[in-house]
Amino acid sequence: QVQLVESGGALVQPGGSLRLSCAFSGRTFDEYTMGWFRQAPGKEREFVTSISWWNSRTRYADSVKDRFTISRDNAKNTVYLQMNSLRPEDTAVYSCAAAHRSIPNEDEYDYWGQGTRVTVSS
């Protein structure tokens, strides 16, 4: 069974930076596309970014493009989310997910972490 454990969530001031990590275990990490999603209270979960398993191709939601960067370290079975220029509207629980597909839709991700909370406030 695949297990995903996020870490790095914190309280940060607007304009600040934060790096989230997601540790993957239980299967062959480099065969999974990894994604980050977020959900604020009272809102639907939304896609943030993803990185493919086969060519490390990335994609980003318009709301985070040019501010957030996803990366993966296959040797460490870890995916990262570097968040810069944070805004209050970035406040949410951030979850990582894994899919055994190159370009998964949200409903095609197979495994989900429990999430880590990010609060952007002064």
Image (cartoon, rainbow, N blue to C red):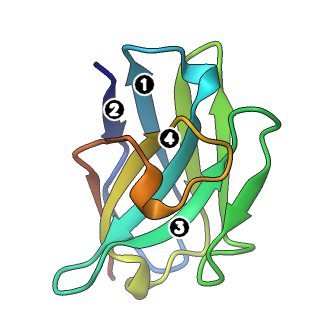
Q: Are marks 2 and 1 in contact (CB under 8 Å)?
A: yes
- Under circle 2, the secondary element is strand
Q: Is residue 35 left or right of residue 70?
A: left
**Cα separation between marks 3 and 1:** 18 Å
- Under circle 3, the secondary element is strand
Crowd class of label 4 (few under 14; some 14 to 19; many from 20; radius 10 Å): many
Residue 15 picture location, percent across and down: 55, 77
Q: Which residue is mark 3?
A: 48
Q: Which residue is mark 4?
A: 99
Q: Are marks 3 and 1 in contact (CB under 8 Å)?
A: no
- Under circle 4, the secondary element is strand
Decide if residue 95 is in sight here. yes
User: Amino acid under label 1?
Assistant: Phe
Identify the mark nearer the N-term, 3 or 4. 3
Residue 40 picture location, percent across and down: 26, 78
- Under circle 1, the secondary element is strand
Image position of 23 with respect to 116: above or below: above
Q: Which residue is mark 2?
A: 4
**Cα separation between marks 1 and 4:** 12 Å
Checking the image for residue 24, the label placed there is: 1
**Cα separation between marks 2 and 1:** 5 Å
Crowd class of label 3 (few under 14; some 14 to 19; many from 20; radius 10 Å): many
Residue 1 picture location, percent across and down: 28, 19
Checking the image for residue 78, the label placed there is: none
